[in-house]
Image (spheres, rainbow, N blue to C red):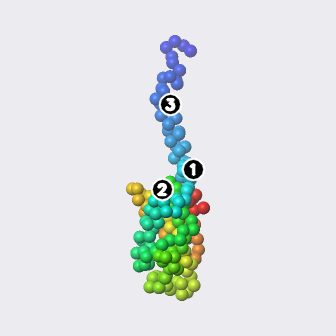
Amino acid sequence: MASGTRPILRERPVLIFIARLSILASLWAGTPASAQSPSHTPAPGSDERKAVMDSLRAPVERELKKRVVFKVDHLKLQSGWAFVRGVPEQPGGKAMDYRGTEYQEAIRQGVFDNWFCALLRKQGGKWKVVVYSIGATDVVYEGWDKEYKAPPGIFR
C-alpha cells in the first residue's frame, strides 16, 4: 500500500455501519409477521382473552339486540391480531334465539350455520373488530390473511 493511502474500511466506518444496518432492516421488513412472533391462545379466564371477547361482544350484541356469550372453538393471537371462531350462545349456555334478527329468514330457508368467526386488531392498546360473520354456510375467513394483511398463523 502506498504511503498516504488508507484502507477503505477504515476511512468510512460510519458508511459501512449504515449500509449493514440498512441491509438488516430490509431483511427484517421482508420477514412475514408469522415469523416475527409465534401465535398463541390466551388461557380461558385470562385478561387478554376477556379483552378480545368483550371487544367482539359489543357489536354482536348490538346486531342481535340480545346478550351473548361465546363458546370458543378456536382463538389465536399474533403480532397484534386475533382470530376467533365458535358458537354464539345466550347467557347460561342456551342456544341463541335468532327470532327477530336478520338471521331468522336465513334459518327458515336452511342457509344458516350456527357459528361465528371474527378478525380483530389491537390498536392503541385496545382490541377492535376488523370483520366478523355470523351464520355463514362457507369458510368466509379464507383469504382474510391476505385481504387484511393478518398473520396466516392465527387461522390455523
Percent position of residue 132, x then y: 49, 69
Q: Is residue 5 above or below residue 38?
A: above
Q: Name the residue type under label 2.
A: Gly
Percent position of residue 27, x then y: 55, 43
Q: Which residue is mark 1?
A: 35
Is residue 76 in view from this perspective? Answer: yes
Q: Residue at x 48, y 27 (%)?
A: 13
Percent position of residue 156, x then y: 60, 61
Is tag 1's residue or tag 2's residue first in the polypeptide sequence? 1
Dot label at residue 80:
2
Q: Residue at x 49, y 32 (%)?
A: 17
Which of 24 and 131 lies nearest the eye of the viewer? 131
View extreme (bottom): residue:
108
Which of 124 and 93 lies nearest the eye of the viewer? 93
Q: Is residue 5 above or below residue 9?
A: above
Is tag 3's residue or tag 2's residue first in the polypeptide sequence? 3
Q: Residue at x 43, y 76 (%)?
A: 67
CB contact under 8 Å: marks 1 and 2? no
Which of 124 and 54 lies nearest the eye of the viewer? 54
Dot label at residue 18:
none
Q: CA distance from mark 1 to mark 3?
A: 28 Å
Q: Quadrant of residue 142?
A: bottom right
Which of 138 and 122 lies nearest the eye of the viewer? 122
Q: Name the residue type under label 1.
A: Ala
Q: CA distance from mark 3 to mark 2?
A: 34 Å
Q: Residue at x 55, y 80 (%)?
A: 112
Q: Which residue is mark 3?
A: 16
Left or right of residue 125, residue 143 in this image: right
